[in-house]
């Protein structure tokens, strides 16, 4: 153990601890911009400088290890002076138009500049704007980039996609798409992890809120909105609501207040997905020679994009079941439209998702099976949803709980847990077991698939077969999985992959908390909601049962195939 003093506090920490983390352990926060624990510890921003007694040069706290007897000052006059100059230098190359920045009020640079009392930028340079295709779902504003390298490192180390790279040298150093590619020609899966780890507004989603406002204002349009499972765990975070205040019922009420005609639940479609995908798995097991193994889940568009870009020979392993988002769109513009006597061409189908990649999934050419344009017209992230609440001046504390509308609003606990890594697997196993054994298992029988690790294996008995399963989140973990499968080092029957660490709860469209991971906490909310639901098996969802009776026939029927399944094309 090492003994040291930080700002007058004596402490003991293990050897190798950084000064920043030693300080954090006794409640002293050293300001920083580029630091991301275990991912980016390169002291690029020099904001975390601290003074060590007896040393003339300041050191960077993020990557300097503690030393025996060290006396550290994290906020001495010298530290404040140098830190301020370092931040002023960053600002000199930054577009400081905060009023028009999507990250205003949630920007580390803005916060630190305010905290340091910087009221004007003493030196400014003209920052050139790199051209960008603003129709792409991910937008980069080069003038707001502070070259912290977080995006480069997240995309390299956590997602293994290597989309970004450093370009130029000296004061012209910048980050851009690697190999001089344009973003649409790169390997970007639109997972959005670079956005949620960017400390400023240099990266963001394409804003589609104006399209939603236009549809809401159009008297011809019937606006039908669906809300993804993970959104309900996070929508209140930026509004300062705690988990209890940010209930599902208040979220529905906020959407009604915004003016959506029908507020439905993607969880309904998640239950529907289980009916199709669970039966598809059983069909593949019965005819195992006809199919490529393992079967992969297909509901995460970041993962589907990853397979298509890096392992296209495995596209046929993906379940043909569409994602819940897309199943919902197809059902809204057929079954729901028919039941209500609405011309599907007048329906504007809007999704609220914790995901940026869903914007692209909705626009794929083959996602228009209902014959009325794209099945899903507009996709908004959780962050865009929050912006709409703000734009409407809704005081969420005064909202009264409201229920989802029918017939696409009922859901079970199995549908709820789709939003957390392992949830699709667990929900599918609950129903597959019931189909094979003729009775429900204990609802938590498959909890072995839950957990924090990026990759988990579990075997389950299904009838007379042992099912080898694997659950993965994060694309670097997915890459390792694929290499193991290719090399024959592992053999599985059913594999669930979610592109974002922790699953959709940690999605790239969720509220941002300066590099802090909220996935686990949000996942806990979904497991709580599952345990509180009266119904916990997708096949027991009464609205799903009714949809089969009235419209789809049975799982994997012709109608189901036409609307709810698709081949994955490269
Ligand atoms: Fe997900 Fe989904 S669970 S991908 O993360 O399957 O985005 O929340 O909506 O579609 O249901 C995202 C979340 C969804 C879909 C569902 C799946
Ligand atoms: Fe990389 Fe994901 Fe960002 Fe695309 S969205 S650049 S894959 S981190």
Image (tube, rainbow, N blue to C red):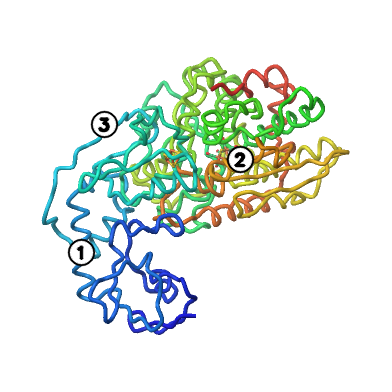
Mark 2 sits near ligand 1, with its Cβ under 8 Å away: no
How far apart in space, not on screen, are marks 1 and 2 (Cα)? 44 Å
- Mark 2 vs 3, N-terminal side: 3
- For the residue labelled by badge 2, is the local secondary structure a helix, a strand or a loop? strand
Asked whether the beta carbons under mark 2 and mark 3 sit within 8 Å of each other, the answer is no
Residue 554: image quadrant is: top right
* Residue at the image point whose x is 77% and y is 50% from the top: 445
Mark 3 burial class by Cα count in 10 Å: few <14, some 14-19, many 20+ = few
In depth, the one of 181 and 383 nearer the eye is 181
Q: Which residue position is annotated with label 3?
A: 131
- Dot 1 falls on a residue whose secondary structure is helix
**What residue is disc 1 on?**
84
Q: Position of residue 523 (x, y in %)?
A: 58, 52
Residue at 23% x, 65% y is: 83
**Quarter of the rendered structure image containing ligand 1:** top right
Q: Tell me if the residue at label 1 has its CB under 8 Å from ligand 2.
A: no
Q: Could you say where residue 390 lies in the image, as x and y percent from the top left? A: 35, 46
User: Is residue 101 depicted above or below 207 in this figure?
Assistant: below
Looking at the image, which residue is at 70% across and 48% down? 457
């Amino acid at each position: 153990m090492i003994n040291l003093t930080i700002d007058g506090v004596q402490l003991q920490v293990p050897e190798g601890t950084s000064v920043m983390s030693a300080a954090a352990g006794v409640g002293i926060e050293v300001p920083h911009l580029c630091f991301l624990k275990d991912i980016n510890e390169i002291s690029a921003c020099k904001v975390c400088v601290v003074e060590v007694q007896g040393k003339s040069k300041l050191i960077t706290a993020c990557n300097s290890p503690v030393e025996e007897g060290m006396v550290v000052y994290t906020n001495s006059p010298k530290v404040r002076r140098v830190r301020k100059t370092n931040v002023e230098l960053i600002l000199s190359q930054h577009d400081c138009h905060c009023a028009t920045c999507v990250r205003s009020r949630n920007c580390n640079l803005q916060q630190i500049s305010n905290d340091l009392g910087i009221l004007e930028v003493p030196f400014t340079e003209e920052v050139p704007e790199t051209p960008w295709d603003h129709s792409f779902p991910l937008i980069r504003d080069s003038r707001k980039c502070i070259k912290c390298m977080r995006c480069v490192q997240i995309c390299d180390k956590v997602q293994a996609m290597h989309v970004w790279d450093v370009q130029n040298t000296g004061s012209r150093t910048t980050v851009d798409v690697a190999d001089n590619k344009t973003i649409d020609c790169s390997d970007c899966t639109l997972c959005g992890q670079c956005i949620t780890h960017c400390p400023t507004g240099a990266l963001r989603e394409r804003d589609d809120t104006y399209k939603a406002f236009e549809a809401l204002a159009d008297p011809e349009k019937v606006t039908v909105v669906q809300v993804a499972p993970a959104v309900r765990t996070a929508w209140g975070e930026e509004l300062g609501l705690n988990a209890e205040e940010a209930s599902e019922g208040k979220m529905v009420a906020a959407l009604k207040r915004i003016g959506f005609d029908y507020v439905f639940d993607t969880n309904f479609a998640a239950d529907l997905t289980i009916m199709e995908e669970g039966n598809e798995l059983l069909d593949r097991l019965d005819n195992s020679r006809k199919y490529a193994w393992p079967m992969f889940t297909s509901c995460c568009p970041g993962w589907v994009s990853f397979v298509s870009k890096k392992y296209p020979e495995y596209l046929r392993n993906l379940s043909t079941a569409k994602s819940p988002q897309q199943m919902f769109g197809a059902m809204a513009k057929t079954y729901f439209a028919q039941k209500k006597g609405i011309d599907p061409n007048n329906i504007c189908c809007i999704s609220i998702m914790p995901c940026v990649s869903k914007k692209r999934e909705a626009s794929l050419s083959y996602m228009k099976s209902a014959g009325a344009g794209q099945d899903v017209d507009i996709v908004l992230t959780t962050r865009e949803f929050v912006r709409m609440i703000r734009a409407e001046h809704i005081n969420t504390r005064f909202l009264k709980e409201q229920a989802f509308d029918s017939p696409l609003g009922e859901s079970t606990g199995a549908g709820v847990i789709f939003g957390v890594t392992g949830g699709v697997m667990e929900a599918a196993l609950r129903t597959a077991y019931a189909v094979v054994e003729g009775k429900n298992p204990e609802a938590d029988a498959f909890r072995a698939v839950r957990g924090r690790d990026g990759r988990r294996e579990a075997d389950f008995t299904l009838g007379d077969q042992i099912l080898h399963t694997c659950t993965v989140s994060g694309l670097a973990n997915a890459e390792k999985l694929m290499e193991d499968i290719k090399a024959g080092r592992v053999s599985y029957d059913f594999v669930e992959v979610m592109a974002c660490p922790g699953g959709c709860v940690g999605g790239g469209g969720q509220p941002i908390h300066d590099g802090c991971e909220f996935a686990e906490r949000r996942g806990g909310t979904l497991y709580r909601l599952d345990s509180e639901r009266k119904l916990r098996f997708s096949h027991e969802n009464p609205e799903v049962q009714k949809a089969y009776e009235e419209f789809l026939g049975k799982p994997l029927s012709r109608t189901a195939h036409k609307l709810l399944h698709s081949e994955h094309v490269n």
